[in-house]
Image (cartoon, helix red, strand yellow):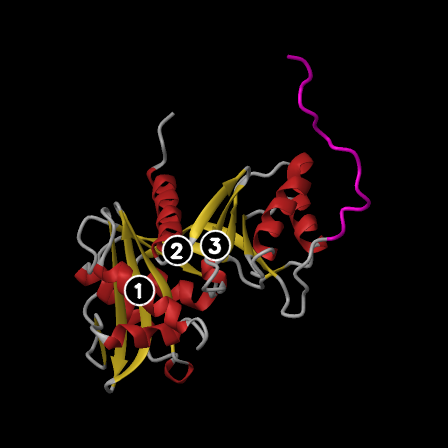
Amino acid sequence: METDPRDAAAEAALEAEKQLVLTLGGFALEIAGAALVTHEKIPVPRFNFVQVGNVGRERQTAFFERALDHYFQRALRPTFRVPLPVPEHLDRGLRSFGFRARPSPLALLLGRGAPPPPADGRVVVAEPTGEAIGALASFWTGEKERPELTAALDVAVHHPNPGERLVPLVARAEGEPVSAALVYRYRSAAGIHLVATRPSARGRGAASALVGYVLREHPVGPGVGYSILSDAPTVGTRLAELGFATARSYAEYELPPDAQLALPSPGPPGPPRWRPPRGG
């Protein structure tokens, strides 16, 4: 059967996102029906999520127990990404554990078409150097996690593994850093990750200028397809103007801030479910 090129591009984009977490010090555990992407030292949703595939109704109990136990033992609050439309049994199962779907779906957008013309110059995009790389961590983490991310960025930028390249970018307006992103290439796929803008600078085109710079200048090298993950409908409209189109959509489930990280009691202990074979 011939593979749909757009489906292959979407799979490559998801793999590149997972590899970004790995190169920054995280890890991924594959279980039946999902990949558990984890970063114990940077407990933010973009680094701790469950990429759900196909989970049958009869196997969901074991699936949820394994996935939640993996994160809860580490005091992490994962998000669950479930492809739309969400199967009824998975929605019911997640809600029974206290998870709720975010208001807007998470969209995986793939770049296509010609790059946009240069910006008008009010926003200047460049690669930060030296200590400026560490300052970018403030866009994505709190003070506690900032040193870990700064150190991980330094290693990944200056000592990449074969087949990958990471380039941080910062957009400045009137000399002040107002927006930032990470461009990460893994093999032939590249993602524009963690695009963030200071609240006081939103609506001034800084993020669009940053994405446009990537599409024109190819900071991680030529011959790659670009992807972006976004859960903001207005951002999706602007990205469409830059040549992006939605390839896949996910419902993203999260725990409310007051939820306790604990699984229900399994009940009283019983006999073992498996016994070793007898005989010589």
Q: Nearer the viewer, residue 42 or 4?
A: 42
Q: Secondary structure at mark 3?
A: strand
Q: Amino acid at mark 3?
A: Thr
Q: Earlier in the sequence, mark 2 or mark 3?
A: 2
Left or right: 65 as drawn, with respect to 84: right
Circle 2/circle 3 CB separation < 8 Å: yes
What secondary structure do most residues of the magenta stretch adopt? Answer: loop
CA distance for labels 2 and 1: 11 Å
Residue at 35% in and 42% down: 6
Q: Secondary structure at mark 2?
A: helix
Left or right: 35 as drawn, with respect to 241: right
Residue 88 x, y percent position in the rendering: 67, 45
Do we see residue 242 in this rendering?
Answer: no
Residue at 39% in and 80% down: 198
Q: Which residues are magenta?
A: 264-280
Q: From what the image shows, is residue 105 above or below residue 149?
A: above
Q: Which quadrant of the figure contains the C terminus?
A: top right
Per the image, the residue denoted by label 3 is 38
Q: Nearer the viewer, residue 235 or 143?
A: 143
Q: Nearer the viewer, residue 176 or 275?
A: 275
Per the image, the residue denoted by label 1 is 153
Mark 1 packing: few (<14 Cα in 10 Å), some, or many (20+)? many
Residue 196 x, y percent position in the rendering: 38, 72
Residue 160 x, y percent position in the rendering: 24, 54
Q: Amino acid at mark 2?
A: Val
Per the image, the residue denoted by label 2 is 21
